[in-house]
Image (cartoon, grey):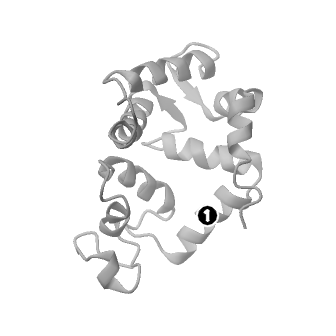
Amino acid sequence: MKGKNRKQNLSDAGELDGSYDQLTELFYFLDSSTYAHFLFEAFDTDKNGSISFEDFAMGLSIILRGTINDRLNWAFNLYDLNKDGCITKEEMMAIMKSIYDMMGKCTSPCMQDDAHREHVESFFQKMDRNNDGVVTIEEFIESCQKDENIMRSMQLFDNVI
């Protein structure tokens, strides 16, 4: 599973090689390169520049069959871009912008340009309990566990496979 610099078409490949290029091709019709990068980093648990089958299986296992705590930890890891143990507004802004860049082109009406900023402000009002400008894993998990909508979304995949 090598190939950060290798390009190949998924339909011609016959196999997935775990490369970043292949992940971005899965979302070819959306502006997904930034979000694909964030997902790639979250799945590349050993940080070797590729996603092994084990990395992929472990990530999916957590998302689909992990406990609520496991899923929340995985989500926190996705948002904590620099892996320093807290989520800053800048990190959340980058994630939300990448999500809104994908969604904005596929929604009707289109998302407003500043929608991701509003989402981040709402996130920090809810999650940053001590108002220090960062969200720790403890604040994140506690806030998520108290939010009915988040808890429902965490259970979406419970009956998938």
Is 21 drawn above or below residue 108 in the view shown? Answer: below
Q: Residue at x 61, y 23 (%)?
A: 127
Is 146 drawn above or below residue 38 in the view shown? Answer: above
Task: Examine the image and state in which quarter residue 99 appears.
Answer: top left
Task: Examine the image and state in which quarter residue 29 appears.
Answer: bottom left
What residue is disc 1 on?
Answer: 60
Q: Is residue 65 left or right of residue 9?
A: right
Residue 36: give x, y in percent of width and height: 38, 54
Q: Is residue 91 left or right of residue 13?
A: right
Q: What amino acid is labelled 1 in the image?
A: Leu
Residue 142: give x, y in percent of width and height: 73, 29
Residue 35: give x, y in percent of width and height: 38, 48
Residue 118: give x, y in percent of width and height: 44, 18
* Outermost residue toward the front in this view: 108
Q: Is residue 118 left or right of residue 59?
A: left
Q: Residue at x 48, y 17 (%)?
A: 121
Which residue occupies the foreground of this view, 33 or 77? 33
Quarter of the image where the C terminus is located: bottom right
Q: Residue at x 67, y 64 (%)?
A: 61
